[in-house]
Image (tube, grey):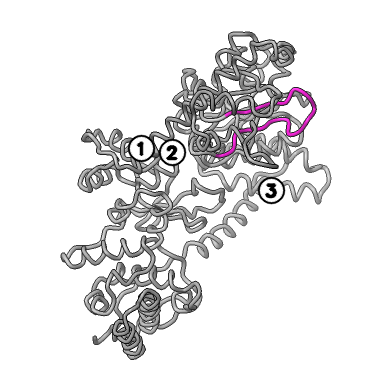
Amino acid sequence: MYYSEEIIEEIRSQNDLVDVVSEYVRLQRKGSSYFGLCPFHNEDTASFSVSPDKQMYYCFGCQAGGNVFTFIMQMENFSFVEAIKHLADRAHITLPQPEYSEEVRRKMEEKQVLLDIHKEAAKYFYANLRSPRGQQANEYLNKRKLNKNTQKLFGIGYSNMDFADLYQYLLYKGYDEALILKSGLVIPKKKGKGFVDRFRNRIMFPIFDVHNQIIGFGGRVLDDSLPKYMNSPDTPLFDKSKNLYGLNYARASGKNQILIVEGYMDVISLYQAGFENVVASLGTAFTQQHAFLLKRYTGEVIIVYDSDLAGTNAALRAIPILSSAGLKIKVVQVPGEKDPDDFIKQNGPEAFQTLLDQAMGAVMFQVSVLRKKYNIEDTEQKIKFTIEVAQLLSRLDNEIERDVYLQEIANDTKISAQSILNEMNKYKAIQRKNTNKINIYSKKIEAQPQNHLKINKESSNIDEKNGLYKAQKNILRFLYNNASFYPKIKPHLSYEDFIDPILKKVAQLIYEQYDKGLNIEPATVINHFENLNEQKQVSLIFGEEKNKSQDYDIEKAINDQLKLIKRANIDKKSRNASDIYEIQSLIEQKKQLEKLYINLISG
C-alpha cells in the first residue's frame, strides 16, 4: 500500500509524539526531554526518553527507538500502513485511496487467508465437540458446569486423536500447505515428509483479538498428559505477549474495571456467572504490552490470582508492570488456595462479588505479603521489614498517597512513622545517585577552538571484522550532529560508498537535505522506512547515547572510519572486477586512500 511522502509527513506532524506516548506512558519533563518507564521492557529507573525537538523516542535500556509511527507499530503490533491509518484517524485526517504494491498486497492477502484458516479450524473443532467422538470432551465440560450457550459464545471445540485430521481437512478445503504450516496449526513430522496436527485430543479454546477475529488457539488435555495447556506458537497473527484472552468481551462489558485471572477456565466460568469484564494472559507472564493494552480500555484492574505461593508471586510481579502503565490496581486472593473457577462454583457469584468489594489496594497487598514474610516481634526481622516497606513507599509518585499509607502502616505495626520516613529518605537518596549515573547522556558534538574534537572509544576503536557497520553509523551520526562539516566530508565520501543498504538510504536522505540547504529532521527520515526493525535501526543513528568515561580524538576517528568504508567499497568492487584497467584503477585508489586525511578544523 502506498501513501505519498507528503501525506505521511502531515500525519506525523499532526500527531505530537509527546502527546501520543503520554496516552500509554507517564512522562516527566527533565530539561528539554521527557522521561518515563519504558513500555517495551521491565525497569525500575526511567530510561525511556522522548525528545519533542526531534519527535523521536529512545530507550537507553533496551535501545528501542523511532518516531511516532514506530511507537504505534510497537505498542499496537501494527504494520506501517495500520499505524498510518490509526494516526490519521487520531488527527482527523482523511486518507486518499491507497495504491497497493505487490509486496503489501501479498502480505495483506496472506493475513486474510490465515484468518480464514483459523476461522475454518474453529468451525471444525466446534463440530467435533458435537459429534460422537467429542463425547469425552463433552463430559469434561459438563463436569466443569459450562452450559451450551457459554460454550457457543466462546467457540469451545475439540481436537480429536487422529494425527492429521485437521491438516487433511484444511487441504480438502483448498488451503495452501505452506500457509497451513504458517498458521501454527500443524507441525512437520519428526520422521519423513508431511505434517501432523499440533493439537490432538484437547478441549480447544479459540483466542480472539479485540476485533473478534480468531488469531490462535489454546488446548487443554483431557487426561494427565503434559503439557496440560498448549497455545498456538507466535505467528503473523498471534503474539501471546500482546494479546489477552477474553479482552474482546471485557472491553465491551461497560464496566469501569477489568479483572485479571490466570487461565481460560477462570475467564469462562466468571463470564458465565455474570462477570463479563475478565481477562487472562495466554500462558506467559504478564508483560508491559499487556498492561498498556488494558490501559486502552480501563483505568483500574483487579488481580484475582490463587492465594498459593505461585499466585502471590505472580501478583507481585504484575503490580509494578501494571502501575507503570498508570493503572489503579487492587488485589484479591481467592481463599483456601482455590482458583476463581472453583470458588464461584462452590460459593456462588454473590460471594465472589464480596471478595471483589473487599479487594486490597496494591500497596497494602504488598505490605501484607511482607508481614507474612517477617516476624516483626523479632528485632532483626522488624528492621528488615521496615527497610522493605520504606523502599515500597518510596516508589509511589503521589505524596499524599505515600503519607496515608505511611500512617496506616505505622498504626498497624507500631513502628514509628519517622523511622519508616528516615529509611525512605535514605533509599530515595541512593536512587537519585543511581539515576544521575544512568541519565548522563552524551550531547551534540560541536566544533571546538582546539585542533581536535572528541568522540567516545566505541566510535574510535574500529576493527575490520565488525567495525564497518559502526563506522557507517558513526559517520552518519557525526554528519547529523555537525552539519558544518558536511562540505568537507562529501567530496571524499559519497552516499553510494555506504555498504549497508539501510544506512546507504539514510545517507542519501541526509546528503539530499544538506544539498538543498535544509536541516535534518530525524522523524521525517524514519518516515521513509516501513519495516519496524529498519525504523529502529535508523533511530539509533539519531538517538542519544550515554557518555563514556574517556574521550578520544574525533578527527582521527572520522578519518579512520571514512577510510574503512572506502576500503570496503573498493574491495567489494575488486571482487566483481574483470577488466585489467579497472583493477589497476582500484589498486591506485587504495593507495591514494592511505594518504587521505581530512582536517576538520582548517580544511
First to last magenta residue range: 217-234
Q: Position of residue 80 (x, y in %)?
A: 36, 43
Is 549 on the left or on the right of 600, as rendered?
Answer: right
Say what amino acid the circle numbered 1 marks: Glu
Earlier in the chain: of badge 3 and badge 2, it is 2
Of the residues tagged 3 and 1, which is closer to the observer? 1
The residue at which mark 1 appears reads as 82
**Quadrant in the rendering for residue 152:** top right
Say what amino acid the circle numbered 3 marks: Glu
Residue at the limit of the structure toward the left, as seen here: 516
Q: Position of residue 232 (x, y in %)?
A: 60, 34
Above-or-below relation of 326 to 577: above
Say what amino acid the circle numbered 2 marks: Glu
SS at mark 1?
helix
Q: Evaluate whether residue 597 shows in this view.
A: no
The residue positioned 25% from the left and 42% from the top of the image is 3
Q: Position of residue 157 (x, y in %)?
A: 62, 18
Disc 3 from disc 2: Cα separation: 36 Å
Q: Residue 76: which disc?
A: 2
- Circle 1 packing at 10 Å, graded few (<14), some (14-19), many (20+), is some
The residue at which mark 3 appears reads as 388
